[in-house]
Image (cartoon, rainbow, N blue to C red):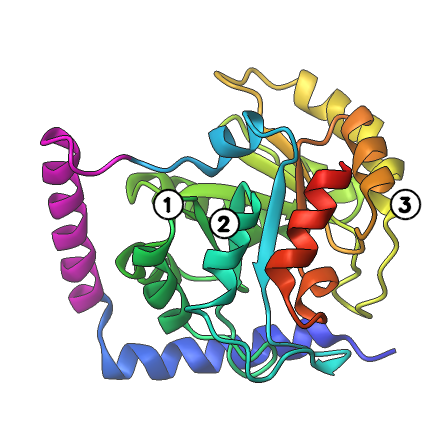
Amino acid sequence: MTDILSEIIAHKRIEIAQQKQAVSLNQLQEQAATVLHEDTTAQAAGTLQRRSMKQSLASSPSGIIAEFKRRSPSKGWIKETAQAELIPPAYEAAGASALSILTDEKFFGGALRDIRTVRPLVNIPILRKDFIIDEYQLLQARIVGADAILLIAACLTPDECRTLTLQAHELGLEVLLEVHSPSELSYIYKETDMVGVNNRHLGSFVTDVENSFRIAEELKQTVAGIDFKTPPLLVSESGISSPETIRQLRSAGFRGFLMGETFMRTENPGNILKELIREI
């Protein structure tokens, strides 16, 4: 069995090293500081409102995180010509609670510029979905306008995950921690904003939505045993396609539902999302 995740992370380390040669960490930190200062000033003036992905999902009757994804390592191109200026705004108009935008280029056909393009066009939270292993990527996310980032337990040690979580919070970013198995529940800390159960195995990319149901009780017990200021919101990721599955997942304790291929493989992703929400 090919371990796709190992291949992705190996390439990601090379990619980040090359990016640091072009723009240093110090330069990126200065850019992020400028963005933070501008946002703080705008918030004080009442011209900018902070977008919370966690709050958006918690208050939504559907909890759909609609994903913008052009390709997959296991399935190839899904929608090669997909335009960031068209599909994410259509998702928002259809009732999405948040957006997930893939920014990995080699394996998913994405780019940071997709978030930069989408940000002024929508008012709902944007998740930077990537294989984040370095503070550098957090700074990038903040600069282009993301509201949250994904941290994948399978890519990190527990200490790395906690360090990146705290660094993300310093930048005003929320964190969706992704787990796949009960053994990764130890990555959940009192600082964790959201916990996502990935129904797709990142080594083989095989998808099984039952994974969320299998982990649900142990996940809730783990969360109950941690002294949170506010408990994390639970998200089910991948392999979801029907309103009935969403209703069942909601009964199991999940409040966010990340969906991508169900929409992206169609001619009009926004219309398909709108229909799904109506059926829910």
Q: Is residue 202 left or right of residue 43?
A: right
Instruction: Give the residues drawn in magenta, as a range.
Output: 26-49
Marks 3 and 1, the one that precedes in the sequence: 1
SS of the residue under disc 1: loop
Circles 2, 1 touching at the beta carbon (< 8 Å): yes
| Quadrant of the rendering where the N terminus is positioned | bottom right
Per the model, the C-alpha gap separating discs 3 and 1 is: 32 Å
Q: Position of residue 68 (x, y in %)?
A: 56, 64
Mark 2, residues whose alpha carbon is within 10 Å: few (<14), some, or many (≥20)?
A: many
Asked if residue 253 is positioned above or below residue 40 in the image, the reply reads above
Q: Is residue 182 left or right of residue 56?
A: right
Q: Which residue is mark 3?
A: 210
Marks 2 and 1, the one that precedes in the sequence: 2
SS of the residue under disc 2: helix
Q: Position of residue 223 (x, y in %)?
A: 67, 23
Q: Comparing marks 3 and 1, which lies closer to the viewer?
A: 1
